[in-house]
């Protein structure tokens, strides 16, 4: 129940309405239940609101941030008594209803914007599937007007060069990392601290803006490891465990989006393996460089690249708007509750 609805039952243990949160692991994530339900044994729930407006209690708990009551050195646990004994301020029911309706409105707007963001991401995923040739095909299924003819293929090593420039004299001090979810970012931003040894960065590779990096670490986001482009606008260094390459032919936006598709995964699976470590993919550099890259005319590449760039911009704007609304809600929670 801490993560939402887990199963459906023919019977119920608690009558609606209810406010539910997890008491172990995922704590503080609230759910307002509008129908009779069966709370999981890892949940804490409220069904007796003692004359208070139920939705107000939900928003009140949201403001109180129940996760701060978590205890334990390992998996955090929420103790019922800690929450029960916490003192708070409650207005009259009439004011509770008005506050609740206001906060519900903000929640609804956040939900609408989150759905728009999710919809744009799904739209992008669909276009990535359709705007590059599928296995055994030489043309994409969705194409911009005015372009005809089959696409050619070029080996990665023929349109790029491996970057092996070492960070001599520690010229660059910012260590970068390649995240499957977030792209190339500063190691400090990703881990909240420096993982690399600042005294030994002279053996790291220098990664310039627009260089591409293959990270052999596999995850749910990247089953064969991610290839990401350095969009930070500045140079940094990366561990020699990564394969860094620089394009010498082709449109950068086009190549970037191709590596966000899944079509190159088959080549990796046929020519590499997980190696000794289950969390890392193993493929030789010489084999990686023979990867076939679909290659239409540079004009078509540019248009495809611009299309996805614009779509990424819309996704980013929508994500920022959703985050701003969440921050606005947090502000109102602090101002409208004592």
Image: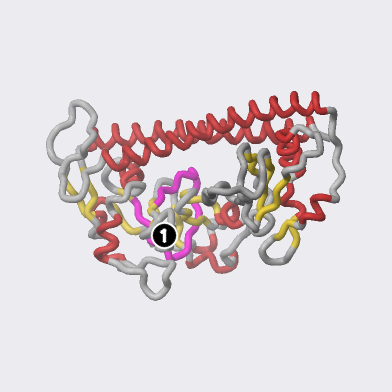
Residue drawn at (24%, 64%) of the image: 270
Give the left or right position of residue 260, taking residue 6 as reference. Answer: left
Residue 138 lies left or right of residue 259; in this view the side is: left
Spot occupied by residue 106 in the image (x, y as percentages of width and height) = 64, 28
Q: Residue at x 15, y 44 (%)?
A: 138
Q: Is residue 272 magenta?
A: no
Number of numbered discs on residues: 1
Q: Secondary structure at mark 1?
A: loop
Image: 159 above or below 219:
above
Residue 297 shown left or right of residue 283 in the figure:
left
Q: Which residue is mark 1?
A: 215
Outermost residue, front direction?
A: 11
What percent of the width, then of the height, locates residue 171? Answer: 53, 58
Q: Judge from the rendering whether residue 6 lies leftward or rightward of residue 48; answer left or right.
A: left
Applied colour scheme: secondary structure
The picture quadrant where one finds residue 194 is bottom right
- Quarter holding the C terminus is top right
Corner quadrant of residue 292: bottom left
Q: Position of residue 46 (x, y in %)?
A: 73, 45
Identify which residue, 211 or 321, lies in the foreground: 321
Which corner quadrant of the image does residue 242 belong to?
Answer: bottom left
Question: In front: 197, or 97?
Answer: 97
Q: Position of residue 243 (x, y in %)?
A: 38, 61
- Name which residue lies at 53% across and 30% down: 113
Q: Nearer the viewer, residue 248 or 10?
A: 10
Magenta range: 228-246
Q: Residues within 10 Å of mark 1 (few under 14, many from 20)?
A: many
Q: Residue at x 18, y 49 (%)?
A: 153
Tell me: residue 270, above or below residue 50.
Answer: below
Image vertical order of residue 116 relative to residue 271, above or below? above
């Amino acid at each position: 129940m801490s993560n939402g609805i887990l199963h459906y039952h023919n019977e119920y243990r608690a009558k609606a309405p209810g406010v539910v949160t997890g008491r172990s692991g995922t704590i503080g994530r609230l759910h307002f239940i509008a129908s009779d339900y069966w709370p999981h044994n890892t949940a804490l729930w409220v069904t007796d609101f003692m004359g208070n407006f139920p939705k107000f209690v939900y928003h009140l708990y949201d403001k109180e941030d129940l996760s701060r009551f978590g205890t334990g050195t390992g998996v955090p646990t929420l103790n019922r008594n800690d929450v029960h004994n916490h003192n708070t301020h409650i207005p009259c029911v009439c004011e509770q209803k008005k506050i609740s309706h206001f906060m519900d409105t903000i929640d609804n707007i956040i939900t609408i914007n989150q759905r728009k963001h999710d919809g744009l991401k799904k739209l992008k995923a669909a276009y990535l599937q359709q705007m590059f040739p599928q296995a055994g095909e030489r043309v994409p299924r969705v194409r911009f007007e005015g372009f005809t003819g089959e696409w050619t293929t070029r080996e990665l090593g023929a349109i790029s060069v491996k970057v092996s420039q070492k960070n001599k004299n520690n010229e660059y001090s910012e260590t970068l990392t390649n995240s499957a979810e977030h792209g190339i970012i500063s190691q400090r931003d990703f881990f909240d601290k420096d993982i690399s040894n600042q005294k030994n960065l002279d053996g790291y590779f220098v990664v310039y803006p627009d260089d591409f990096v293959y990270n052999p670490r596999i995850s749910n986001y990247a089953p064969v490891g991610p290839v990401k482009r350095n969009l930070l606008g500045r140079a940094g260094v990366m561990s020699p465990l990564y394969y860094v390459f620089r394009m010498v032919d082709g449109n950068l936006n086009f190549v970037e989006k191709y590596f966000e598709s899944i079509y190159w995964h088959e080549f990796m699976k046929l020519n590499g393996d997980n190696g000794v470590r289950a969390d890392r993919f193993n493929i030789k550099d010489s084999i990686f460089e023979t990867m076939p890259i679909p290659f239409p005319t540079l004009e078509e590449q540019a248009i495809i690249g611009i299309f996805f760039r614009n779509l990424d911009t819309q996704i980013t704007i929508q994500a920022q708007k959703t985050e701003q609304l969440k921050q606005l809600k947090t502000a109102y929670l602090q101002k409208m509750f004592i």
